[in-house]
Amino acid sequence: MIKTGIAKLDEGMKGGLREKSNVLVIGPPGPEKVGIALKFIEQGLNDGDGSLYITTDVGPKEIEENSSLLAEHANKDLIFIDCYSWTLGEQPAGRKDIMVPGPSALNDLSIGIAQAMQKLFKPDKKLRVVMHSLSTLLLYNNPEVVYRFTQITGARLKSSNATTLFLIEEGMHDQKVVTTIKHLVDSVIEVKNENGKIMLRAPMNGVAQWIEVEVPL
Amino acid sequence: MILSGISKLDEHLNGGFSENKMVLISSVPGMNSRVFAYHLVQANPKLKVCYVVENAFPDQIRRDSSRYLFSETQFNKIAYIDAFSTALGLPSKEKYSAKDATSIDSIIESAEHAVDAEKADVLVIDSLSGMLGKNPSKLSKMIESLRKLSDKCSVVCLYTKWDASEYNDVKSRFDYVVEIKSVEERLLSRSYFKVVKAPGEFNSTAVPFRIGFDGVAVYVPKIIITGPFHAGKTTFIHKVSTKAVSVNRMGTTIALDHGYVEHSGFSVDLFGTPGQERFEFMLDILNKDAFGVVLIVDSTKPETFERAKRMLAHVSRYSLPYIIAANKQDLPSALKPEKVREIMETDAKVIGTVATTGEGCMEALKMLIDMIVEQETL
Ligand SMILES: Nc1nc2c(ncn2[C@@H]2O[C@H](COP(=O)(O)OP(=O)(O)OP(=O)(O)O)[C@@H](O)[C@H]2O)c(=O)[nH]1
Ligand SMILES: [Mg+2]
């Protein structure tokens, strides 16, 4: 089991997510999904796991601004892959992230992931990955290509001991696309914000009813 | 002749690529095929190269290529066709750019224009898979246009194999196909390339390489010969090797047997592990260059198989291909290979050997090498 870092959710899931699984985190646009992702990575950093955070529509710096723990561990047991900054022009000064030309350069992204995994991988170490987000990839690529990317990357990440959160925006894509992606992952965490209350459920992990949780942001 | 710029590859192609052909450089996802294009640019200073880039800004390719120790002047002469900027809704800074980078037709049109204007000798497409990703149904039409262009210049397409069935279709339409693969799917370490298609004669032997500061560096892969105490490792290595020594490689910490084998164009370094407790440590160090493992057991000593099984468990953590040599088959009390397999509770290939005479040893090694280079990746 691998803890998400959200106590109530872990409790409901009887300890956490299944290790070496691919998990879709789906919810309407809003900061809640990233909040879950940050919790997940922070938990890993505290537990001594290796972590990889892939950004596609913000820079790593913006992610770090929301978590001093992430900032502290960056380039050590946390690696960022940045598919965003180059589309604006330059690589941000002073950063050592793995750079990918843009969200349509999926092979470059795969190269980056392989590089990061080679750095982080140790036979007995748990790894955590956040793909933030599939929605951006879907905006810049044909859905078929994104399915194959998700499938191949997901399988590889699993076999390198990683548990991965794939973030996706609800309501932004065809229902058919979302359904297909749900079939490609092992489980789903659903998120919603009800009048400021952040609610989660994970039906495939034993949390069938919505539960209210505390997430930063 | 157009040189690939990687001497081992040129050798396998019998000199290089003939002019006015369609060349496919195909790789499994996550492997860098671009650097193969850089070598080609570097190796043919007299040729004019047009380079279509649809998944990055041309500046990013300029920067990427400058990370390696290639001559910059040659890269400065490349005429880039920017098929990226307009897809992001941005104006292009390049002389040549696709009006609408989301459209395959528009990209091809700008490439045709550049090839004519520059009197190009080589057109690089980076990448074909990316272009197909925009509209997979355009494959035939696109290949047709590229084929026409190949009357004017050589067409070199970089391709990522996301989909096996699409790949088979794509592959059939090219004159030359070079595949870049990885022995270990998981971390994509241990890469190799091989020529799988060419109009004339070619050598399809797999060539292990690493990407370093000077681009593609070919190296001799290691095969680890291991097994419990006194199983016959040293004898095995000395028997199969063209030359072999027992060296003390890294100071006093690890002494190991070392041999070198050349067989039908494939060369490997053999490393024998010493004293049993060192094995895990050795593997942790050697696994990056290791392509496979031969586990040797003394078939007369089933009491040592427990230890051998633990060694296998360690090997499997690195996803290294392996086979088992059931050694000392000349002795009357030797268990047959099938029996060894049964006691070891393994699905691995087990082959009977007599290290002292060499019987079965080369076969075992060949079998392992075949397993390594045949192992199909996604
Ligand atoms: N009869 C017979 N003896 C063998 C065979 N292979 C090796 N031996 C003998 O077994 C003994 C051990 O062989 P080595 O090659 O030194 O074994 P090793 O695995 O390198 O041993 P260590 O390095 O001490 O673990 C030697 O006396 C060899 O001559 C074989 O196939 N048949
Ligand atoms: Mg020995």
Image (spheres, rainbow, N blue to C red):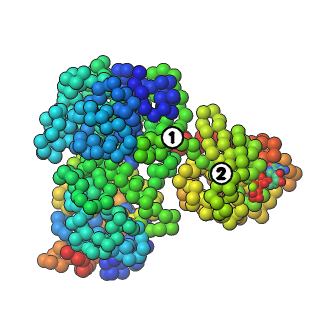
Name the residue that disc number 2 marks. Answer: B271
Q: Which residue is mark 1?
A: B218
Expressed as whole percent of the image width and height from the top left, the position of residue A18 reads 41, 69
Looking at the image, is mark 1 or mark 2 earlier in the sequence? 1
Q: Which amino acid lies under the numbered mark 2 shown in the image of this protein?
A: Phe
Q: Amino acid at mark 1?
A: Val
Decide: marks 1, 2 in contact (CB < 8 A)? Answer: no
Ligand 2 within 8 Å, label 1 CB: no
- Tell whether B224 sits left or right of B38: right
Q: Residue at x 40, y 54 (%)?
A: A114
**Residue at 29 percent of width and 71 percent of height:** A71
Instruction: Evaluate whether residue B161 shows in this view.
Output: no
Q: Residues within 10 Å of mark 2 (few under 14, many from 20)?
A: many
Output the chain of dot 2. Answer: B
- A80 horizontally vs B216: left or right: left
Q: Is residue B154 visible?
A: yes
Most distant residue in the right direction: B332
The Cα–Cα distance between marks 1 and 2, rounded to whole angstroms, is 19 Å
Percent position (x, y) of residue B312? 63, 59
Q: Dot 1, crowdedness within 10 Å: few (<14), some or many (≥20)?
A: some
SS class of the residue under badge 1? strand
